[in-house]
Image (cartoon, rainbow, N blue to C red):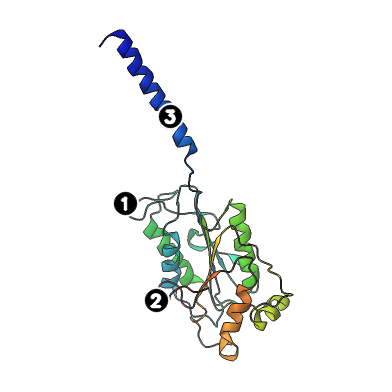
Amino acid sequence: MDKKSTYMTLAAIVLLGGAFVYWRSQVKQEPTAHVVLVTDTSSSVLKNCNAWAETVRKSLTGLNITEDSRFGLIHTGSVAKSSMAAGLAMDTPIPIDSTFGGSAEGGQTRGQFLAAIKTTCEGLPVADGSAVFRSVKMGLEHLRGLGCAGPSSCRLVIMGDLDENIDSEIAKRVHKGAPGPADKPVLENSFTYTELCGWEQITGGTLQRTDTQAIVDGFAGLFTVPPVRRPYCDGAASQAAVR
């Protein structure tokens, strides 16, 4: 190969390399995913710890889990609480790969991560109330703080009967059922996928004396974007998602 051909070949390689780098810089990167689970641990809700772990496992499906992805668990009581048991703080790293043994910071595998969720569930006492509204607000604030910018990247799952009994004004509105023209949304959730599930997983307490569907409609009406609704959470029963 003569010098001219060599120079032309090298120039072509440089151009192709530059074009590739430019193309890579223009490709839209999927945002880092984060997940928050809000659970009602009051006496009216059946505590199914397998469902907690399975719901989180399913929630991670299709998300861009990176080393920066975080999981938060919030459980209800007379006040909303973030769970610190079993190493599940509000910024628990999510293991990246569930198939090939990948792990999060500290070497935790996906299986160990899900087992920790189940262990946390089993160790929680029965709550002294249902501050569902405050718990959900805490979850939304946390996801917003992590930089969530759309429903494809972050997920908030709310498990329980949604029967708020701490905030009297919210409880009154929720029990009215579907919101009327004067009822404005009070939970901004456009930046995350939001799901309500598990209101049929009850022990026969509070909701035996109330209209379950009215409460679900009332709570769903608190959001700016209607959440996905499922009577049973993953691992509890097979139910299609409904809006």
Inter-mark Cα distance, 2 to 1: 28 Å
- Residue 7's spot in the image, x, y percent? 35, 13
Q: Are marks 3 and 1 in contact (CB under 8 Å)?
A: no
Q: Which numbered tag is attached to residue 100?
A: 1
Q: Are marks 2 and 1 in contact (CB under 8 Å)?
A: no
Camera-side mark, 3 or 1:
3
Q: Are marks 2 and 3 in contact (CB under 8 Å)?
A: no
Above or below 52: residue 177? below
Residue drawn at point x = 44 percent, y = 31 percent = 21
Q: Nearer the viewer, residue 103 or 156?
A: 156
Residue drawn at point x = 66 percent, y = 66 percent = 187
Q: State the count of labels.
A: 3
Above or below 163: residue 27? above
Q: Which residue is mark 2?
A: 238
Above or below 235: residue 35? above
Q: Nearer the viewer, residue 75 or 214?
A: 214
